[in-house]
Amino acid sequence: MPKKIGAVAVVGGGISGMQAALDLADSGIKVHIIESKPGIGGVMSMLDKTFPTNDCAMCTMAPRLVEISRHKDIEVISHSEVEKIAGKPGKLNVTLNTKARFVDVDKCTGCGSCTQSCPVSNFVQPMLPEDKPVVELNPEIRERIVDIVRKHKHRRGPLMPILQEVSAFLRYFPEEVLKYISQETAYPVAHIVRVATFYSGFSLKPIGKHIINICMGTACYVRGSQILADRFSDLLNIGMDETTEDMQFTLKSVRCIGCCGLSPVATVADEVYGKLQIKDVPGILNKHAAEPKHEGELQIAN
């Protein structure tokens, strides 16, 4: 009986489909991975850790992505869905419905230029001057905000430099400022808020002059960073992610500062404090507190 030679279609490019494709391809069978999304990875690509081992999801998935991209017997057909399967076992014909990409896949290098020039995402229906909403800014900050937006609004990808300068100026984003940026750049407010809340360096609520970041990574945690955090919290009378009433300090936690050899570590403003002990906390706070000029200025007792 002649040996049947053919190919296999794996429908779905999640972690299970990826592993199935690799196992089949390693046995000498040509494999086509059919994925409806623009890329493979599935839900696992959206996860941080996986249950029950708490393994890093990307650490599990990345080696398989590399293997699939290099394997001579695996072809990924993304942005496609199975429309019809006809024939009989051993001789099946699969009809796919592939969505339009508007780019030549064979020439694509992943540079991202097409997304910057895409008329669908960048086209905004112009509003008549009389219909254009006017956002009122606080007079104390208006001139500076207008200058920042005017400086960047006509460049390619203006949102991030605008947000960075505004954050450096105000240290947070008032609602009317985000609406004004939306009005002047034509980015939807929802998109601006999504960007502003994604990066830990940005804030939607007022923060203190000095940001205290306490490392809660493994090395720092086992050496007492939680006790240090409690000490900072007690002396400042605030909880994590809160700001003192005089707007001097905001208390935050981070997962790694990159100074594991100095653990436990905290940063205040641009200074790094390593091998911290509880007795060091009052001195650090007093160093960064503003000099007392009037009654009620912050002073930390040892």
Image: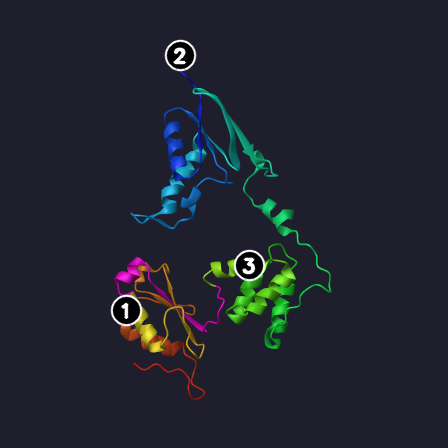
Q: Which residue in the structure is indicated by mark 1?
A: 227
Image location (x, y in percent) of residue 21: 40, 31
Mark 3 and mark 1: span between their CA atoms?
38 Å
Residue 42 falls within the magenta-colored stretch? no
Q: Is residue 212 magenta?
A: yes
Q: Which residue is mark 3?
A: 190
Residue beneath disc 2: 2
Neighbor class of circle 1 (other Cα within 10 Å; few <14, some 14-19, many 20+) is few
Along the viewing direction, whichever of 53 and 110 lies nearer the viewer: 53
Q: What range is drawn magenta here?
A: 202-225
Between residue 271 and residue 41, name the one nearer to us. Answer: 41
283 and 1: which is toward the camera = 1
Q: Considering only vertical position in the picture, is 78 above or below 259? A: above
Residue 35 is situated, as x and y percent measured from the top left of the image, at: 48, 36
Locate residue 14 relative to residue 278 in the image: left or right.
right
Query: In the rendered view of the protein, which quadrant contains the N terminus?
Result: top left
Q: Quadrant of residue 288?
A: bottom left
Q: Residues within 10 Å of mark 3 (few under 14, many from 20)?
A: few
From the image, which quarter does the C terminus lie in?
bottom left
The residue located at (43%, 72%) in the rendering is 210
> What is the distance, in whole Å, between disc 2 and disc 1 at their CAs?
73 Å
Q: Earlier in the sequence, mark 3 or mark 2?
A: 2
- Which residue does the image show at 73% across and 61% down from the upper left? 128
Tag 3, which secondary structure?
helix
What's the amino acid at mark 1?
Ile
Callout 3 amino acid: Ala
